[in-house]
Image (spheres, rainbow, N blue to C red):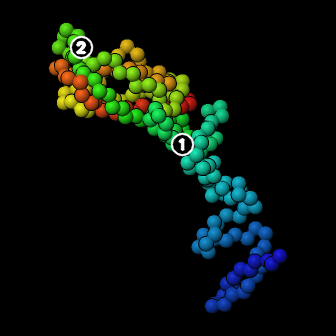
Amino acid sequence: MTTPLKFVPVGGNSGELREWGSGDVLTIGQGGTGVAAATLAQLRAGLGLGPAAVAAILGAVSQSGGVPTGAIFQTGSNASGDFIQFASGWQICTKTQTVNTAISNTDGGGVVYSTAINLGSYPAAFSPLAPSVILTVSGSAGSFMTASTVPQTPTIWGSYFISSGAARAATNHYISCMAIGRWFL
């Protein structure tokens, strides 16, 4: 095995070639790290890097006892929508759904609403608390989303009504959903 050589200035415009010795450090200016380390763990510690310095950026997130142990974030899609989970425990789920329904039920107080629309399961479950849910609807002017008798849980979006100030014939309504919460505490 050949021992690497280094240039060492000795004064003026001259220098010498010397063998690298134990404890020699290649400075940042020379293209190195500026840290003497025998292992990668010592190098990371010497540079002040935490465990995220070696974590996969995108992959399966995981945790043990509330401490992240996997990738920094994970994304996924399935028939229930899309999700992103963060190593910190936060999660965002999204879904779009097209519903063809009339707005024709009345509460007697001027609000007209559709039959209940069940939005199904989240693409990834929340734990242990239900997330905050934001819903929007488009497709008929003056319509808005209102909660029904089935609230969201850690696993389902819940059921909602499309409401309006006036009755409307059946038409396509485009529902956009976003839930923000935690996949672990």
Residue assigned mark 1: 74
Image coordinates for residue 146, horizontal then vertical, percent: 30, 21
The residue shown at (67%, 64%) is: 35
Vertical placement of residue 166 versus 8, above or below: above
Vertical placement of residue 106 versus 47, above or below: above
Identify the amino acid type marked 1: Gln
**Mark 2 crowdedness (10 Å alpha carbons): few <14, some 14-19, many ≥20:** some
Image coordinates for residue 102, horizontal then vertical, percent: 24, 21
Does the image show residue 165? Answer: no
Q: With 172 as the anchor, is 6 left or right in this view?
A: right
Nearest the eye: 131 or 47? 131
Eye-nearest disc, 1 or 2: 2
Among all residues in the image, which is located at the extreme bottom? Answer: 13
Q: With 36 as the anchor, is 139 left or right in this view?
A: left
Work out whether mark 1 precedes mark 2 in sequence or the reverse, and give the earlier one.
1
Nearest the eye: 69 or 27? 69
Identify the amino acid type marked 2: Asn
Vertical placement of residue 39 versus 67, above or below: below
Q: On the image, which quarter does residue 161 sit in?
A: top left
Nearest the eye: 6 or 120? 120
Q: On the image, which quarter does residue 96 sit in?
A: top left
Look at the numbered discs 1 and 2 and tell me whether their residues touch, using CB distance below 8 Å.
no
What secondary structure is marked by label 2?
strand
What secondary structure is marked by label 1?
strand
- Report the quarter where the C terminus lies: top right
The residue shown at (54%, 35%) is: 89
Q: With 183 as the anchor, is 7 left or right in this view?
A: right
Image coordinates for residue 82, horizontal then vertical, percent: 45, 38
Nearest the eye: 23 or 127? 127
Image coordinates for residue 141, horizontal then vertical, percent: 18, 30
Number of the label disc, if any, that sits on residue 105: 2
